[in-house]
Amino acid sequence: MAAIRVEGLQKLYGPVRALDGLDLTVEPGTVFGFLGPNGAGKTTTIRILVGLAHASEGRAWVTGTEITTDGHEVARRIGYLPEEPAFYPWMTPREFLDHVGRVFELSTHERAARVNELLDLVGLADVGKRRIGGFSRGMRQRLGLAQALINRPEVLFLDEAVSALDPAGRKEVLELIERLRGQCTVFMSTHILADVERVCGTIGIIARGRLVTQAPREALLAKYAIPAFEVETESGFEAPLNGWAEVLRQKSWVQSVSIDGLTGRIIVHEIETAKRELLPSAVQAGLVLTRYEMLRPSLEEVFLRLVGEGRKT
Amino acid sequence: MIFLASLRKELLEQWRTYRLLAVGVILVVFGLLSPLIAKYTPEIIKLIPNGEALSHLIPTPKAMDAVTQYIKNIGQFGVILALLLTMGAVAQEKEKGTAAMMLVKPLPRVTFLVAKFTALALMFAVTIAIAGAACYYYTWLLFGALDAPHWLALNGLMLVYVLVYVALTLFCSVVTKSQAAAGGLALGLLFILGLTGSIPGLGEYLPGQLLAWGGGLMAGQGEAFWPALWVSVGIIVVALMGARFIFERQEL
């Protein structure tokens, strides 16, 4: 059973089509990165899945329960952290978590234990008795994560949960998310690709309300890999490098060669042939190499390429 | 259980944000002042220039003057406080995002609303009870004992009267997106109720008649205005049901 299943989800805001037939499946236990440019429909999707907004068309299931038929049951099994979590400023973090625990009908003993455990987990144990009104954004975000975990959710929705944090705060929260891998399904929307590359095992890319692609991170990177190599020579080898480039351009398995100072970039048609022949050919040309690398595309390149295609359609 | 959790939060909020204290102080002060004003108005008038002549025109104050003053004060300030304290109840939580934070959890929206209304009702019940006791005590000191069962009935009717405005303002707080808009809308409804109440033949069926009924009881008049009570309860129920109907369908 999928942790999240979405079929033909549509959301209209007047003439604006925020979601345009979104289909999506998220397997249990994964950390799913939901990527997309601003206005792509990420937040709208999450708001529908957690029950804050209604879909215009389509169906969605969370932990096997259809959200429109039994939203209350779904609410028991999920956790949600919005981009800017809001709290009652007159409460302390301990009181807020206790209040959330009461709403989830946890027993007194369980609630007390869980509150202590979560305050420790998010590093707020020392300020457990201070009023939330005086908290920094990072502290609020960490408290937001704690409240989202109080019921040990099967699915945790994080909507741009780390985007607004400073690098140190982001690192802390991402480490917390990494620790959740295998314990629950994490559905994390963001536009920060480095965060996704760091923690997400599976990636879905959304553009203009539609899913452009969805795949495990490595498979996605491999699928959109550019068959290219880069070499760098020592200073003084510019002439042999240019000569080698001319030789390579004659080869049938080479698509193009470009030289930039001491660096040569070779794009090939046949990657296996290139792996076999490129290095011996460089040695034969008398080059002294300081770097030889098969290029791996960054998620950013894949994202821009796919979102670019999404925009054209 | 969830209702109690929600009610606990509302009551704690009233305490921590000093709302309970503020309402209590305002209503108790008016409860205490009502018999004092009634008793000493002729004395105060004597102190102003040519006041001696005027004071002869004023009849000797009686306990009923204190009661009339009390009804007027608590009726007016009760409604003002009902508007001020209820207009942000839901609208502010929607505006700030706390409603969205809490309502993605297994907290039914109807429970969220009913807990708010119950907390406000309890706050007004407690503060009107204290204000009533204070007024009763001072009236007893200055004029003599009042009819206690009728005094209880009067305060009960005043509570229902204030709760009509709590329920209507809560409805406004649900349908609008900001507490200012909720306050404006509630004020509009207050004027409409006030205007319709002044239409001959119609007023006796509206909440305003509850105060007249209470005053009549204290004056020893036996006339009851049950339709006004049923209409008031009806307005409360319809406002709450309407608020629930709209809130259940709202996107947060």
Image: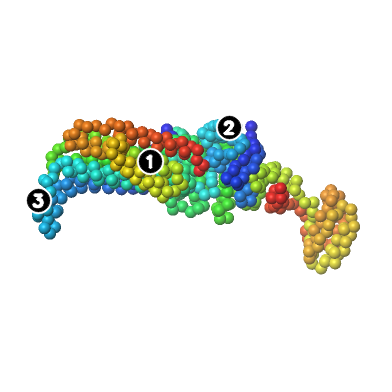
Instruction: Select label 3 or label 2 by which is in front.
Output: 3
The numbered dot on residue A308 is: none
Q: Judge left or right: residue A199 versus residue B76.
A: right
Q: Secondary structure at mark 1?
A: helix
In the rendering, at what x and y percent does residue A309 appear? Answer: 72, 49
Instruction: Select label 1 or label 2 by which is in front.
Output: 1
Residue at the limit of the structure toward the front, as seen here: B200
Task: Return the residue nearer the eye: A77 or A13.
Answer: A13
> Please, what is the three-letter code of the amino acid marked with disc 3?
His
**What residue would you read off at disc 2?**
A65
Chain on which label 2 sits: A
In the rendering, at what x and y percent does residue B20 appear? Answer: 32, 45
Q: Judge left or right: residue A14 versus residue A135.
A: right
Chain on which label 3 sits: B
Q: Secondary structure at mark 3?
A: helix
> Please, what is the three-letter code of the amino acid marked with disc 2?
Thr
Q: Is residue A285 positioned above or below B18 on the image?
A: below
Locate residue A293: give its quadrant.
bottom right
**What residue would you read off at disc 3?**
B56
Disc 3 to disc 1: CB gap under 8 Å: no
Chain on which label 1 sits: B
In the rendering, at what x and y percent does residue A109 appear? Answer: 44, 35
